[in-house]
Image: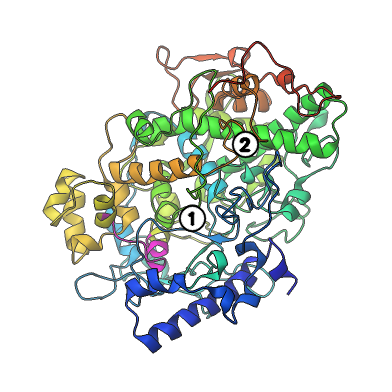
Amino acid sequence: MDQLNSIEPTPPVIAELGELNQEVTRVLKQKFDLSPDEILNGLPLIDMSRTEFWPLCPLMVKPLQCDPTGRFRSFTGHCNNLKNTAWGAAQTPFVRYLAPRHPDGIQMERSSVVDGSPLPLPRLITSKIHKDSDQPSGDLSLLIMVWGQVIDHDVALAAPPRDEQGMDFNCCRRKHPNCKPIRIPDNDPVYSPYKQTCMDFKRSLAGLRPNCALGPRAHINTITSTIDGNVIYGSTASVANQLRSFVGGELKVQNSFAHLGLKPLMPPQLDKPDLDCFSRPRDTYCFLGGDERVNEQPTLTVMHTLYVRDHNRLAKQLAQINPHWNDDRIYHETRHIEAAIIQHVLITEYLPLLIGKDMMALFNLTSAPAGQYWHGYNPNVTPSISQGFSTAAFRQGHTFIQGKVRLYDPRSHTQVGFKLLRNFFKRPFHYYIPGRIDEVLAGIVNTPAQMYDPFISEEISGHLFQEEGEMVGMDLPAINLARGREQGTPGYNVYREWCGLPKAQSFEDLEAYMSNRTAYLYSRLYKHVDDIDLWSGGISEKRMGGAQIGPTFACIIARQFANIKRGDRFWFENAGFPSSFTLDQLREIKKTSQARLLCYNSDNMKTIQKNALKLEHPIFNPRVSCSQIPDIDLSFWQEDPSNPGSFRTSNIDDGET
């Protein structure tokens, strides 16, 4: 009962109630012969506060009393919206832009529109359409993939089932209600030589809608949906406190190389040290971060490390500027600034490159003009992450992944080695080698990303999370397809129509949107063009002019980030809230860039291209000295001790409209 009265119940507690909620839905469907539309739109209208289920409904999905005067976000995201207090909060469900395609209207995986038969095996689609082909980009650096993963991990994390000890388990070796193992077809080019016929896959845990409303199966998003830096800080107070040093507003670190004059590493993962951590040497640990996927792959771990270093760097400066601030104030103000910097880089560097300037303008995602606030906050818009975005559209980055982790000298920007990605999954121990952080970081900005196309590196389509001594791992494209199907994600063609794009009436129509080869292969694999899975169809589209991805995914991604921006009371450009920055502070935040993060938090990188998301080019993207990369001037956060909340200003008028 204690967890029911908390805004931080654990996913297993929520899932148990989610399954009960789903069973109530099933019984009502059977008793009253409800249609899928009645299940989706009628059952949620039932007032659950008048039912016997209400005492079981956790506090975190009930309306809360909120303090509208707070300057800082809650860790869980509750009370961002003062009326709908659970919108965008951790442990609440993914929302849907389109009705789910569950054959039973509740929870069965999506099937063929022709006859209700199962869709093609996910692994078969990988081996035919998403096979490996080395097609490096001519202008994108690998940072486009890595930073995209950081953003993904800041907004979405479905809850995976765990065993009784809170550890992972393999569905090919045991039975569990949430097990849905992926069957590997005969004569598979990667797995059959090793006689593997099964791949581990689990359903994501069931969730609870606000006020425990009934309806089709909901799925827990365990983290906050807003761009708030939870990838650094966590989405619960308990995780945040694990990461804090409680001294000077700083985060915990390991000063492993202080004697060499190198910057610190993240703290060690001491609680459950073998969870999501492979082949751990004795007395050596994976890292502890704000997101549990911190050790997933090496370039991601580097970005986590840079953000922790940047937090502590800024916290030290704020402590000097405001000696009257205590640890708590320094920590939260630094967290507030870091979230704003991430939001700024998102809408000025990453999204314009990914979806193009036209989509940015169409969805009002462009940054406010210099010296002005943005006035688009809408309390009627939820920032919650949509299910089509999380299971498909924002998995577009998988096509950018390189199969090799290239190591570069950070000073000369010359390659000094490489490792296959399969040897690094959940094994970050090489970062205990002095200088390795910089070598991987320099590799990220000097390595071209792969082209946006249907082809996926075999390092993630056959060797994902491959363990020591094994010859094969998992298949990420197959997992993407299975995840979309189990969550009832509508097909690719449905989303095209929703985006206002021409709907394919036949497989031949697809040739206008993707290669003839891919359209032909779809006709051989699927029974109907409407059966094509959203993720597969989306990454197979031809790129839009001025963008790096196709129109369907650009549409879904733009809509999602527009909702995040409009539905976030703490968005960094907002005016008139206790959280609002002064225009001087806003100007300083807008001086920052991804190159700044890399330059000022690496150990020995002295030069970098101005736009780190793109490869160096002597004319269009020249490499410059780090001293030429603007840093944020925190003097505008100097507070008058006699007048709390009054910051140093220049001549900018904060009363603009």
Q: Position of residue 86 (x, y in %)?
A: 59, 57
Give the labeled residue for mark 2.
339
Residue displayed at 42% across by 66% down: 487
Question: What is the distance, in whole Å, between disc 1 and disc 2 at their CAs?
Answer: 30 Å
Secondary structure under tag 2 reads helix
* Residue 447 visible, this angle: no
* Closer to us: 368 or 622: 368
Q: Position of residue 171 (x, y in %)?
A: 51, 74
Give the labeled residue for mark 1.
464
Say which label, 1 or 2, has the lower sequence index.
Answer: 2
Residue displayed at 73% across by 49% down: 240
Q: Position of residue 115 (x, y in %)?
A: 21, 76
Residue displayed at 44% across by 17% down: 621
Q: Position of residue 250 (x, y in %)?
A: 79, 37
Left or right of 449 in this view: 260? right
Residue displayed at 81% across by 40% down: 328
Secondary structure under tag 1 reads loop
Q: Which residues are magenta?
A: 481-492
Amino acid under disc 2: Ala
In the rendered image, the residue lying farthest to the bottom is 31
Amino acid under disc 1: Leu
* Closer to us: 358 or 34: 34
573 in relation to 494, above or below: above
* Residue 630 visible, this angle: yes
Verify whether residue 487 appears in magenta.
yes
Verify whether residue 155 appears in magenta.
no
Q: How many marks?
A: 2
The label shown at residue 521 is: none
